[in-house]
Amino acid sequence: MYKIPFLDLPPLRAAAGTVRLPGSKSISNRVLLLAGLSEGTTAVHDLLDSDDTAVMLAALKTLGGQIEAQADGVLNVTGIGGKLGTQAAQLFLGNAGTAMRPLAAALALLTATQGGSFELSGVPRMHERPIGDLVDALRALGCEIACLGNEGYPPLKLTGPSALKLDAPVKVRGDVSSQFLTALLMALPLVATDDVQIEVVGELISKPYIQITLTLLERFGIAVKRDGWERFTIPAGSRYRSPGAVHVEGDASSASYFVGLGAIAAVDQPVRIEGVGSESMQGDVRFVEAAQQMGAEVKSGPNWLEVRRGAWPLKGITLDCNHIPDAAMTLAVMALYADGPTTLTNIASWRVKETDRLSAMATELRKLGATVDEGPDWLRVQPLQDWKPASIHTYDDHRIAMCFSLAAFNGLVTEHPVPVRIEDPACVAKTFPEYFETLFDTVSASVSDIPVITIDGPTASGKGTLADEIAHKLGYAVLDSGALYRAAGLAASRAGIDLDDGKEVAAVARALDLRFAQGRVYLAGEDISDALRLETSGQNASRVAAHPPVRRALNQLQLDFRRAPGLVADGRDMGTDVFPDAGLKVFLTASAATRAERRHKQLIAKGISANIESLRADLEARDARDKNRSASPLHPAQDALMLDNSAQTIEESVELVLDWWARRRPFKVSR
Ligand SMILES: Nc1ncnc2c1ncn2[C@@H]1O[C@H](COP(=O)(O)OP(=O)(O)OP(=O)(O)O)[C@@H](O)[C@H]1O
Ligand SMILES: Nc1ccn([C@H]2C[C@H](O)[C@@H](COP(=O)(O)O)O2)c(=O)n1
């Protein structure tokens, strides 16, 4: 996951490949609660691992549930069998509506019948998300609930025991959030000694989510009787029983980004999405129909989808999105690529989600240059030709971060493509922690659009340290090109080849079986990272690097590191020869004395004895060879910025280079 302040998406061009979706958030948290309330142990397969499921799991543990993770990723949840394991607790539920609402209802009823005192709280935004209609329904049943901040909003305090009145139908509003009805449907089986009726007041929104609730309740032994979408009856004697094992479907709302991706950019090959398909129980799978209306070509199987671009530009549509409230946000960004306006209606529920999504979508789309009109429950988006480089604020809302990634394909409709900045990309942790990694595995960009920062300079000037830090802060990949020359020198000397024989060493370099993973370097499967850092490896690298055939042999390997979202490359000729079009070139130096001292410290820290004078002599000899060779000698590129860090800390160098980079980015918002 990219835990950085912002992630810049370069202009993207095409998409293809297979995406395995993380588990559905709605199903995951419902299954966890039902398993947590049941008798027996439930083996939960393919559970979503995210912020929202983490708070639910923590709450269940506090209430007496037992959670055990198996080595294969399956989670065994042993439920409380309807009996509270504690009489008092404070539960922090983050910004997880799928935890706050149903837990509040279940715990209110259990507290009423078994006694206790519980506080349910969340992040500040959770305390702005209404829960009053559910609280009213629970109070009418006899539960004692106090709103500790504003009336009708969390945090909540539940106390008991108190007498429950279950003989009259429980009334709950269905037109603000369907989660209130879901909460009652999941909680009332805990106390249904007689039939309990729920009556929905107002038109029920998001019916597919209620269908998920009913389907899962049935799996846990509760056969709710449904009379239209207005009346539901929990049968007398209902009791939760574990079904033994449950498989969580992939998240259909998360599928929408890849369906959108296919519709926009899968021209040659489809985007295949695994985890949801024609047999999905999730309502958001019907997003596929909306994408088809906009022009997508979609094939499907029971739990997969394959999406390609059909009509292009996409077709503007008008759609009542009541049945796909979450996925519909993706349509608002797809609309930028349409042939006419797209109007999304019946989306008032957007206003009470992680943020006021209606207002947020309109604001952020306008930053891109789009013309957007909004009403209390609708949004109209015009197609966009004149794109502006925008820094998208994400409001701690995973779906805003994910759907705006589709704006990075603007190069398909404009001659002047722009990058898109996604602020706080880690907010995707709510449902799809690896979203951006998955996206980058599925898309391609024009090489010249992928940003590169080069850091060249003499040995021990701190290039690697600076490159790693900058790359980490920007979410970019790193190329330590010296490691390639070091590996070539190591492999050649192990093979007994004369290091001055350029042709022979080049043959070795061409055949190198190198792999880079988690900061380590592997040669034919062997971890050679430590061997590469030896001083002899540095000297040997400098020798083999002087041969033009060796440099040519390693050239493509270096170019292959240039992948979205970007690259920081360090070496001797990164800015001069390998990436001459780099967006920022830094030439990093420090005095020979400083560099010898740093290298000395580095070696001593590793437990390797070293002499500072001979280190200095070695590095000066290496500098001289690297500067004076004919092939790609070490010298600053004409357009490089010079940085002597002799008197700087690492942090100061990093800040300075990030500042130089920020000044070259087209975004208005400063770091
Ligand atoms: N600005 C700095 N201030 C103090 N120490 C630094 C600074 N930059 C780097 N160092 C330290 O200097 C040592 C050498 O840095 P590093 O290995 O990054 O250099 P390099 O240029 O990549 O070397 P090589 O070319 O040999 O790979 C490290 O121990 C690092 O922590
Ligand atoms: N782009 C590069 C990178 C490295 N080399 C050579 C010259 C260096 O002395 C040697 C080791 O590099 P280091 O790991 O110390 O950065 O490799 C080069 O010629 N061009």
Image (cartoon, grey):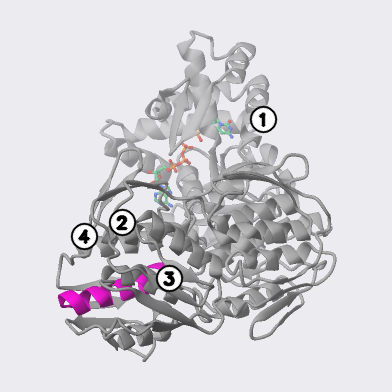
Please name the amino acid that badge 4 sits on.
Answer: Ile
Q: Tag 1: Cα neighbours inside 10 Å, few (<14), some, or many (≥20)? A: few
The residue at which mark 4 appears reads as: 80
- Find numbered disc 4 in the image and state the secondary structure of the residue it sits on: loop
Please name the amino acid that badge 1 sits on.
Answer: Gln
Which region shows up in magenta? 95-117
Please name the amino acid that badge 2 sits on.
Answer: Ala
Where residue 128 sits: x, y (%)?
43, 83
Vertical comparison of 241 with 477: above or below: below
Q: Which label's residue is closer to the chain start, 2 or 3?
A: 2
Dots 3 and 1: beta carbons under 8 Å? no
The mark tally for this picture is 4
Q: From this viewpoint, is residue 308 visible?
A: yes
Task: State the residue in front, 190 or 486.
Answer: 190
Within the image, what quadrant is residue 203 found in?
Answer: bottom right
Quadrant containing ligand 1 reads top left
The residue at which mark 2 appears reads as: 35
- Find numbered disc 2 in the image and state the secondary structure of the residue it sits on: helix
Q: Tag 3: Cα neighbours inside 10 Å, few (<14), some, or many (≥20)? A: many
